[in-house]
């Protein structure tokens, strides 16, 4: 007896769903937890476990040239990692820099439920300095660039303040600056204006209450977190496609964010940055999203204006909110190149020695730090690997360019590259915007 058409369609759909789930499960089981290669001589693509402050923590290192300047990226939260976004925004940046992402203690790949008592700002700073020394020893002994995002700017400013001799320059994205009261006032003023324009009477009524607290959902809804999105979905979809994260790592992201946010002890300064840190002895750059009210850019701009430092620059990202590196990646790349050029000139003038590398540390490998490397270094035929040429097309890079011994691109990663694109309130405009962005790095 023939089944009616709707039943057959349902059965086919169920079968396709089962196959899709199986592919995703196989991908997480066999292909995740590594970083894809960069097919160039002298490149590095390495996912490593390092011991910092007696605790194993994970770092991702990627760059086309290991002699290029090193950038240490400090994520926000304090427990919300950025490593899972790396594959989406930094591919072109890897041509000019060695980019290091670090999932700090308790965050992302470094999540552990038994961290009570270890989550202090001082311990996190000590971990930062230890990792900085490891990177400097490993990559030529020179100063490195310190880039902070959101809460990472709080950590980064303290690090640059206490140990300016380690860093060539500091770059703040979504820069923290003022105390909670001033931040809340700026956020409420913004939300009240947007609610009035859009006729959101419910939000206006809520904001008039003296006990009202700013809700993150409202900031998202009015483009103050991601300018072209109204929720966290674009970041989530990019995270699903991150090759460095296993299923367990992905499940630990929220656990880590909650744990670190709840347990972090602030034991270094008792005032906000704009009062506690009035001076930095290295070049300082603030990259601010024009629409950022998560950490209000207007307050950060005021902080930079009052900050005493030898060189400073404010760069506005007109089409961004709290994530300018993610929302405008090409502009971020160009501005980082400007940071590099400006900082090099500054240090040559300052002490006639590029980045002033301390001679006693140059070339010395870390002696007391345990490192578990999951390298994907490739030394390919120079005739095939044209490192300075234009970006390869996806089709050729996803097939022939993978060197022997390196796992191929997985099916779900290919799906991510073409289907799981972050969406905003307008899918069409989002796809048009993203079509002009560089491809994801597992093809390069």
Image (tube, rainbow, N blue to C red):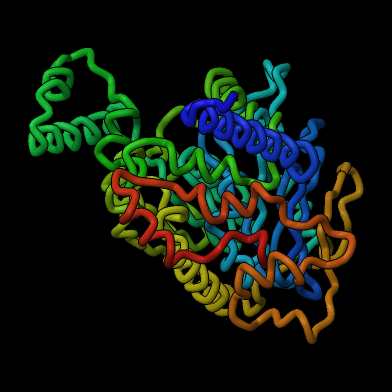
Vertically, is 118 above or below 419?
above
Of the 4 image quadrants, the one containing the C terminus is bottom right
Q: Position of residue 381 (x, y in %)?
A: 84, 81
At x 54%, y 30%, the residue is: 8
Q: Nearer the viewer, residue 104 or 201?
A: 201
Question: From this viewpoint, which residue is outermost toward the bottom?
Answer: 383
Residue 137 versus residue 92: which sits nearer the camera?
A: 92
Image height of 149 relative to 308, above or below = above
Rendering coords of residue 237 (x, y %)? 51, 42
Q: How many numbered dots are placed on residues in this image?
A: 0
Which of the 4 quarters of the picture holds residue 294? top left
Question: Going 40% across and 34% down the picture, which residue do you hit?
Answer: 272
Residue 387 position within the rendered picture, expressed as x and y whole percent measured from the top left? 69, 79
Say whether residue 79 is left or right of residue 180. Answer: right
Q: Nearer the viewer, residue 125 or 187?
A: 187
Q: Residue at left 30%, top 43%?
A: 425
Quarter of the view holding residue 315: bottom left
Residue at 41% from the left image edge and 54% from the top image edge = 327
Along the horizontal axis of the image, is 2 left or right of 383?
Answer: left
Give left or right: position of 359 versus 222. right
- Residue 310 visible here: no
- Residue 241 location, x and y as percent? 60, 45
For the N terminus, the image quarter is top right
Residue 3 seen in the figure: yes
């Amino acid at each position: 007896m023939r089944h009616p058409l709707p039943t057959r369609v349902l059965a086919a759909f169920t079968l396709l769903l089962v196959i899709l789930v199986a592919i995703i499960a196989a991908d997480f089981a066999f292909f995740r937890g590594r970083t894809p290669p960069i097919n160039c001589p002298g490149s590095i693509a390495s996912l490593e476990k390092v011991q910092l402050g007696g605790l194993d923590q994970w770092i991702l290192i990627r760059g086309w040239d290991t002699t290029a300047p090193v950038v240490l990226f400090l994520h926000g939260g304090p427990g919300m990692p950025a490593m899972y976004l790396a594959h989406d925004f930094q591919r072109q940046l890897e041509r000019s820099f060695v980019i290091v992402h670090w999932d700090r203690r308790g965050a992302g790949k470094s999540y552990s439920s038994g961290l009570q008592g270890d989550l202090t700002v001082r311990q996190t700073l000590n971990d930062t300095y230890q990792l900085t020394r490891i990177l400097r020893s490993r990559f030529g002994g020179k100063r490195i660039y310190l880039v902070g995002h959101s809460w990472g700017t709080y950590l980064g400013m303290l690090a640059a303040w206490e140990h300016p001799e380690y860093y060539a320059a500091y770059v703040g994205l979504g820069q923290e600056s003022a105390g909670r009261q001033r931040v809340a006032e700026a956020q409420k003023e913004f939300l009240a204006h947007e609610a009035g324009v859009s006729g959101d009477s419910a939000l206006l009524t809520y904001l008039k209450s003296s006990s009202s607290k700013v809700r993150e959902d409202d900031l998202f809804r009015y483009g103050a977190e991601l300018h072209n999105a109204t929720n966290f979905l674009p970041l989530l979809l990019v995270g699903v496609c991150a090759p460095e994260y296993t299923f367990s790592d992905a499940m630990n992201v929220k656990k880590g964010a909650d744990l670190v946010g709840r347990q972090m002890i602030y034991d270094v300064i008792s005032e906000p940055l704009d009062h506690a840190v009035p001076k930095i002895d290295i070049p300082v750059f603030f990259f601010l999203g024009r629409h950022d009210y998560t950490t209000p850019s207007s307050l950060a701009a005021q902080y930079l204006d009052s900050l005493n430092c030898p060189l400073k620059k404010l760069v506005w990202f007109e089409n961004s909110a709290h994530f300018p590196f993610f929302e405008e990646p090409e502009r971020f790349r160009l501005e980082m190149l400007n940071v590099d050029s400006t900082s090099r000139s500054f240090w040559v003038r300052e002490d006639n020695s590029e980045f002033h590398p301390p001679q006693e540390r140059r070339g010395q490998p870390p002696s007391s730090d345990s490192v578990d490397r999951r390298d994907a270094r490739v030394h390919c035929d120079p005739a095939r690997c044209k490192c300075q040429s234009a970006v390869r097309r996806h089709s050729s890079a996803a097939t022939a360019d993978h060197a022997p011994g390196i796992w191929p691109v997985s099916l779900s990663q290919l799906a991510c590259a073409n289907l799981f694109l972050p969406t905003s309130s307008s899918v069409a405009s989002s796809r048009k915007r993203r079509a002009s962005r560089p491809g994801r790095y597992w093809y390069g």
